[in-house]
């Protein structure tokens, strides 16, 4: 027996984009259908292993895709609830103002965007709040303007990385 079901929104996939959209629509009172290709990522110690996740591609599909020349390749993708976001390194960087401008390069011209960084800035700020982004404004001379500070202070380095950071800072101070 066929049913006539109406949805106000259908979201395909719960990765970073689909999951964020579902989060924002959840309180709207609208009827939402979320379609997911895979099941839940298994809870296992290999989830935390960079070797397993990134080098051995433990959670990537084994299927083959084909490029425009018919050459087979394995896509770097996984079909899990949450998509590739389940094993994502979580660097949430803002584009720079100049990224929206026309760029002339060796192969031609990338046209200027119809929208600008300022159009996206409120959404960057909102996303940083939603995803509890850590950071410190003012350290990168190329960073774009922001309407709000980072929600959390920068994450501290692991001990060996802190040693390297200290050595680099000492070298820069000695140089100048």
Image (cartoon, rainbow, N blue to C red):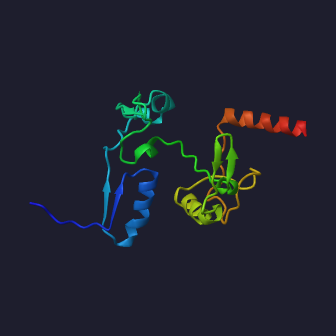
Q: Provide residue 86's location: percent of width, then percent of height.
A: 44, 44
Depth check, front residue: 132 or 128 = 128
From the viewer's perspective, is 100 left or right of 170? left
Depth check, front residue: 163 or 54 = 54
Residue 18: quarter of image = bottom left
Q: Residue furthest bottom?
A: 29
Q: Is residue 155 visible?
A: no
Q: Provide residue 74's location: percent of width, then percent of height.
A: 41, 31
Q: Provide residue 83's location: percent of width, then percent of height.
A: 40, 45
Q: Quadrant of the N terminus?
A: bottom left
Number of numbered discs overlaid on the protein picture:
0
From the viewer's perspective, is 93 left or right of 70? right
Residue 62: quarter of image = top left
Q: Residue furthest front?
A: 108
Depth check, front residue: 96 or 123 = 96
Q: Provide residue 51's location: percent of width, then percent of height.
A: 49, 28
Q: Residue furthest left?
A: 1
Q: Is residue 13 visible?
A: yes
Q: Is residue 82 above or below residue 150?
A: above
Q: Is residue 134 above or below residue 43?
A: below
Q: Residue at x 43, y 35 (%)?
A: 68
Depth check, front residue: 13 or 50 = 13
From the viewer's perspective, is 120 left or right of 9? right
Q: Quadrant of the C terminus?
A: top right
Q: Is residue 117 above or below residue 93?
A: below
């Amino acid at each position: 027996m066929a049913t006539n079901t109406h949805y106000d929104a259908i979201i395909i996939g719960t990765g970073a984009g689909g999951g964020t959209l579902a989060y924002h629509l959840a309180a709207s009172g609208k009827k939402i259908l979320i379609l997911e290709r895979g099941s839940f990522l298994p809870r296992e110690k290999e989830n935390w292993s960079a070797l397993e996740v990134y080098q051995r591609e433990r959670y990537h599909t084994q299927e083959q895709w084909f490029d425009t020349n018919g050459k087979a390749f394995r896509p770097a993708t996984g079909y899990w609830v949450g998509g590739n976001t389940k094993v994502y390194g979580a660097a949430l960087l803002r584009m720079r103002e100049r990224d929206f401008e026309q760029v002339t390069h060796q192969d031609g011209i990338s046209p200027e965007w119809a929208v600008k960084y300022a159009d996206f800035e409120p959404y960057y700020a909102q996303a940083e709040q939603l995803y509890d982004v850590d950071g410190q404004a003012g350290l990168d001379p190329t960073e774009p303007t922001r309407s709000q500070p980072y929600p959390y202070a920068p994450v501290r380095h692991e001990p060996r990385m802190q040693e390297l950071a200290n050595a680099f800072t000492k070298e820069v101070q000695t140089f100048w």
